[in-house]
Image (spheres, grey):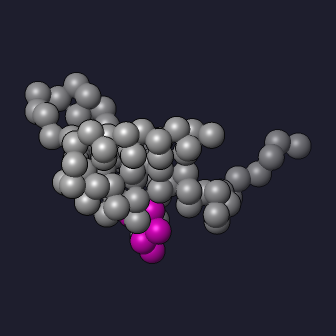
């Protein structure tokens, strides 16, 4: 459910801010599908979003990149499953 909310927020931001945010969204949506494991960690794009929120700069593609990366991680876990997670006994 959170992935759908993030996807809707990415689309909303892309409509508001134009082509540069669309490019950032498309590029960073694909990041979790790269073969390197650290790109699937949630805290990295979360840091991007927090830095944009509390930072002294205004560049919407930076924010959209973090949101799209989080959306890509959610989609990756839906499609591939969450590895090494076991339910408590």
For image coordinates 40% across by 65% down, the residue present is 30
Which image quarter: residue 38? bottom left
For image coordinates 39% across by 46% down, the residue present is 11
Q: x, y (%) of residue 5?
A: 52, 38
Would residue 4 appear left or right of 33 to someone viewing this image? Answer: right
Q: Is residue 7 visible?
A: yes
- For the residue pair 89 and 67, the one nearer the viewer reads as 67
Would residue 46 appear left or right of 73 to someone viewing this image? Answer: left
Q: x, y (%) of residue 20?
A: 19, 54
Residue interval drawn in magenta: 31-35
Q: Is residue 32 magenta?
A: yes
**56 w.r.t. 10: above or below:** above
Q: x, y (%) of residue 37?
A: 46, 65
Which image quarter: residue 10? top left
**Residue at the farthest top position:** 54
- For the residue pair 86 and 6, the one nearer the viewer reads as 6
Secondary structure predominantly adopted by residues drawn in magenta: helix
Label tally? 0
Q: Is residue 24 visible?
A: no
Q: Is residue 20 magenta?
A: no
**Residue at the farthest bottom position:** 35
Which image quarter: residue 2? top right
For image coordinates 42% across by 39% down, the residue present is 9
- For the residue pair 58 and 88, the one nearer the viewer reads as 58
**Residue at the farthest left position:** 57
Q: Quadrant of the C terminus?
A: top right
Q: Quadrant of the N terminus?
A: top right
For image coordinates 64% across by 57% down, the residue present is 78
**9 w.r.t. 54: above or below:** below
């Amino acid at each position: 459910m959170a992935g759908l909310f993030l996807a809707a927020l990415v689309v909303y931001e892309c409509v508001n801010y134009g082509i540069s945010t669309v490019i950032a969204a498309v590029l960073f949506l694909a990041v979790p599908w790269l073969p390197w494991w650290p790109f699937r960690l949630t805290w990295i794009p979360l840091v991007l979003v927090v830095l944009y929120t509390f930072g002294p700069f205004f560049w919407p593609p930076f924010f959209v990149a973090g949101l799209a990366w989080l959306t890509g991680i959610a989609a990756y876990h839906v499609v591939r499953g969450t590895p090494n997670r076991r339910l408590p006994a």
